[in-house]
Amino acid sequence: MIKKPIFVALSPNTQKDDIFLASKLLFQPWKWKRGKGLVFLEKELKKYLKTKYIFLFNSGRSALMAILDALNIKKGDEILVQAFTCNALINPILKIKAKPVFVDIDETLNLDPKDLKKKITPHSKAVIIQHTFGYPAKIKEILKITKEYNLSLIEDCAHSLGAKYEGRLCGTFGKASFFSFGRDKVISSVFGGIAITNDDRVGENLKNFYQKLNFPSFFWIFQQLLHPILINIFVFPAFCVHPFLGKIFLKFFQKISLLSKAVFDIEKKGGVAKYFPKKMPNALAILALNQFKKLEKFNYHRKKISQFYTENLKEKFIFPFLKKIKNNLSPIYMRFPIFISKNSSKIIKKAEKEKIFLKDGWQGSVILPPDTKTEKMRYIFGSCPFAEKISKKIINLPTSPRISERDAKRIVNFLNEI
């Protein structure tokens, strides 16, 4: 019997209706750039997030570029960010010649308020909190610090659409916030993102930035529409036969530019790819809207699968903060992180032999993906020891809509046996 492959990161949200919708849009190029999808998505997200201003971009990093511009961040200004983050967050800071200052994480895998306070200087202008894997950061403590030092708070909600802190949605606390609809995020349109704010000055600045942008090219949009189709018709079945064949198909489609990469080579060296910043095209807004309609169902499923992991994994795997989530937090579990006492890469390789693919780019470095040139990101080794430790010991388990309880049981049995 051929084992079904289990993935943590390869288009984990895509369902039959998403594939059909992408296939339909592929033959409607007049809908690719402009259309009502943008209007409807903006309206629904604005109502859900209860925000005054919202702008739709072709990625979360485009949205962050807009926010940095709207906050008037200049050359030499310091932006405090957590270690254990993606290079897509750091590169927009470097692009404007501002300086990322890395703050260690705490047991929640989010920015540590104590280390934050130590690293503030007269040049500090803003703090970015991440809500890693959909677990809210210590917002109240961090807000108190930002007010004390007159710093702007930016929320990175790429992992946390639907997560709540003290009854309020993450993304509604900061001066501005951004979300990502990337291929492995809470909802997915392959690429996409938004910037939001309730501040009038920031809102006007965001509007000015947005109006100067163009839409991505027709070919770029074509690539993204192909993604759910090619992944499901060719790549997934190839992985069913053999992991090597699946990887060959994936790399082949990327090499001939039918599929785009999630992170581009230039971004691993401290640069920004030519595709950003751009406006969100209408075709991707339609895909995002279709996924947004399923958000509550998706997040309920993530919580259910995470509960299964908590109850069935050996206790040594579970992060302490996951054993007892505080009453004021409502995480959405975009991933379920576990802690391995040995080097996580060895376990990931063993899992692959069982067709359980747990490699999602969040292991092996404090700035992800692991082949990022860390020195180009201005990270100083030893400055965030807990993040450095976690990056070598963490494995993220899938919680996405494609993961059934039977799949979760396979993962649990594999981990408990090793």
Image (tube, grey):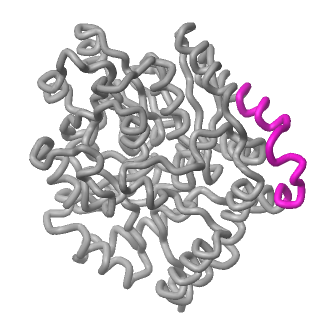
Q: Is residue 4 above or below residue 343?
A: below
Whether residue 290 sits left or right of residue 29 in the image: it is left
The part of the chain drawn in magenta is 24-43
Number of numbered markers: 0
Q: Was residue 240 drawn as part of the magenta stretch in this picture?
A: no
User: Where residue 183 sits in the image (x, y, percent)?
Assistant: 57, 55
The residue under the point 67% across, 37% down is 279
Query: Which residue is at a point 29% across and 9% down the rendered structure image?
Result: 150
Is residue 88 placed above or below 208 in the rendered structure? below
In the picture, measured across the screen, residue 88 lies left or right of residue 58, that is left
Q: Is residue 125 left or right of residue 241?
A: left
In what quadrant of the picture does the C terminus appear? bottom left
Residue drawn 69% across the image and 61% down it: 223
The residue sitting at 40% across, 41% down in the picture is 89
29 shown above or below 160? below
284 or 380: which is nearer to us? Answer: 380
Q: Position of residue 323 (x, y in %)?
A: 25, 44
Residue 311, compared with residue 54, is above or below; it is: below
Query: What is the x, y in percent for residue 77?
Result: 30, 23
**Between 211 and 85, which is closer to the camera in this rendering?**
211
Magenta highlight on residue 36: yes
Q: Quadrant of residue 402?
A: bottom right
Whether residue 171 is visible here, answered yes or no, is yes
